[in-house]
Image (cartoon, helix red, strand yellow):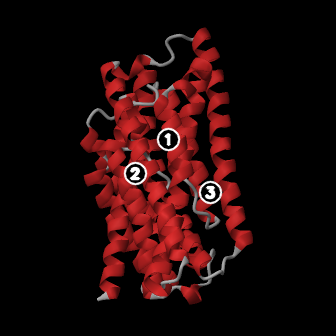
Amino acid sequence: MLLAVAFAVSFFFAMNIGASGAAAAMGVAYGSGAIQRKSIALLLCGLGVFLGSLGGGEVVKTIGSGIIPSSILTIKIVTIILAASTISLFAANMIGIPLSTSEITVGAVVGAGMAYQTLYLSKLLFIVSIWIIIPVIAFTFTFIVGKWFLRLKEKHPYIEQGMWKKSLMSLLIVTGFFEAFSAGMNNVANAVGPLVGANLISVNSGTFFGGLFVALGAVLLGGRVLETNGKKIIHFSPFEGCAISGTGAILVILSSLFGLPVPLTQITTSAIIGIGTAKTGTYIWQKRIVIQLLKVWVVSPIFSLVIAYSLVKLLLDSDIYTFIAIFSVFLSTLGIISLKKTVITEEKRSLHEHGEGI
């Protein structure tokens, strides 16, 4: 019975991954107008993440045994890790915020490891440093490209019109699909990695079935996140969209080849903000939706860590530290609810202002 619960939670988590990180991959193509219909964008995203998931074995191994010893990954611990991750991600999807499933999952794994006082600390610190470095690289690169493109348009004002525009639109769809592919390659590990680490499923079977459910989640549940990344941060020209999607895809695929779980949504959104800063200076940083994205990124791994830690203590140990952990979960929940109210208010304001027309 517990085994069935573990798999059910894993696949439900995979669907929420598709709704969050994977769906955000097509946000740029949709926001720039290269893909007019939301349903088409989500279908292409689903196909891309499924194909990419088949090559995500190295990241699966990292999540399964690279942060905590696989010896402590019993069925109960796996279920707790997946449940903590799912709760955090489901809350973010209800808000409509693109959230890093890698941060959530690693946070939950760390929470379980802390409960047993066993962590591969050096590997964990390396992963966290990558979380900081790669979004900075994405922001810097797209900022430079954005400035260069502005100068290019001054000399050639019609560069994004006529046949050039059609070519760039086609390229944007390709790069968006490429980014969805990278999402599958990196993010499917978050759902099935704990199962693989506990030897409940093989790497190949895990990536296949996990990829199916990630794709299903992207198609059925990804609409709200697609709107957030595509419409509510900045409007894109075709060239800018290609730069954003291409940057995200390359960085995530390179990370996946080395088995590193990285925050795709942070990378993509950092690239978007880089383009926005190049066009408008610091004005984009004053948009409340950007501030809320940053806040949720900080809260999410702590939120899943505390949930996983408290569930281990509550269900397996039942000691006094449970009360401390549960109190922390309560405070974190209040923070999420507060962010939700603010984001909903900002979404309504953005719709009234037609996206602010940046």
Mark 3 secondary-structure assignment: helix
Disc 3 marks which amino acid? Leu
Looking at the rendered structure, the kind of residue marked 2 is Ala
Q: Check contact, mark 3 vs mark 2: CB within 8 A.
A: no
Q: Residues within 10 Å of mark 2 (few under 14, many from 20)?
A: many
Rendering coords of residue 154 (x, y %):
60, 10
Local crowd at mark 3 within 10 Å, few (<14), some, or many (≥20)? few
In the rendered image, residue 98, in percent from the top left (x then y), is placed at 44, 46
Choose mark 3 or mark 2, whichever is in front: 2
Q: Which residue is mark 1?
A: 293
Residue drawn at the location 37% of the way across and 65% of the way down: 14
Q: Confirm or deny contact between disc 2 and disc 1 (CB under 8 A).
A: no
Check disc 2 and report the residue beneath it: 92
In this rendering, does residue 147 appear at all?
yes
**Circle 1 crowding by C-alpha within 10 Å: few under 14, some 14–19, many from 20:** some
Residue 202 in sight from this viewpoint: no
Above/below status of 74 relative to 356 = below
Q: Earlier in the sequence, mark 2 or mark 1?
A: 2
Front-most of 190 and 286? 286
Q: Please state which amino acid type lies under the numbered disc 1.
A: Leu
Residue 275 is drawn in which quadrant? Answer: top right
Residue at image position (32%, 67%) is 12
Label 1: state its secondary structure. helix
| Residue at image location 40% in from the left, 36% down from the top | 342
Residue 159 is tagged as none
* SS under mark 2: helix
Q: Specify the quadrant of the image occupied by residue 231.
A: top left
Residue highlighted by disc 3: 254
Q: Foreground: 125 or 169?
A: 125
